[in-house]
Image (cartoon, helix red, strand yellow):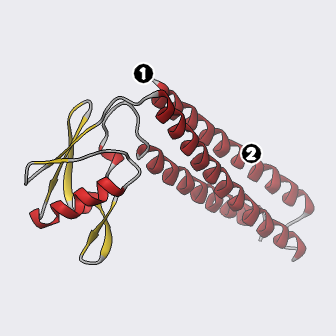
Amino acid sequence: MSAEEIKELLKDAESRMQGAIQSLLEDLGAIRTGRASPALVEKLPVEYYGAPTPLQQLASISVPEPRTITIKPFDSSTLKEIEKAIRTSDLGLNPNSDGKVLHLNLPPLNEERRRDLVKRMGHRLEEARIAVRNIRRDSHNDIRDYEKEKLITEDELKRGEEDLQKLTDKFVEEIARHGQNKEKEIMEV
């Protein structure tokens, strides 16, 4: 065992950190901006036969106009449940139904709502940073264990720790960049 194991460990940490970023991007996509986006409602849980099911599994979602989302259920019997899920969500949207399709008209965001969204986004960014730091901590403990068990040298331990920190910094910066982009999008009038 040697530097090879550390490489594997770092590769695993990187892939887990990438997963944290992917999860963050999905969550940021669901935060409303001035433009309509299917990501806003795709993951919305809808009660379907007693189980919460993501809306994207129950309906086709399209954006015919910049401020309109159209939701067409695959099974028309789910229309009422989908409508209820949208009304009770924290999206603050009121769906219009024509009996077959739901139309969501996104009103322009006011200043107060924009600030709330930025605050909510800040919480989500912090959760992502914590996830990345937890992955770093776990990997760091593993590298230390390798050294304690004399599987790697002290120099390899130091190098591994440095590489792990560089990896962590890279992902924390990426989180910040995604946050800045999303904030710009939200605050855009």
Quadrant of image for the C terminus: top left
Q: Of the residues shown, which amino acid type is indicated by label 2? A: Lys
Tags 1 and 2 touching, CB below 8 Å? no
- Judging depth in this view, the residue of 142 and 105 nearest the camera is 105
Q: Residue at x 56, y 55 (%)?
A: 20
Sequence-wise first label, 1 or 2: 2
Residue that protrudes farthest toward the top in the picture: 189
**Label 2, on which residue?**
166
**Label 1, on which residue?**
189
Secondary structure beneath label 1: loop
Q: Residue at x 65, y 49 (%)?
A: 126
User: x, y percentage for residue 54?
Assistant: 32, 62
Q: Residue at x 90, y 57 (%)?
A: 155
Give neighbour class at mark 2: few <14, some 14-19, many 20+ (Cα, 10 Å): few
In this view, the mark in front (1 or 2): 1
Residue 34's place in the image compared with 28, above or below, is above
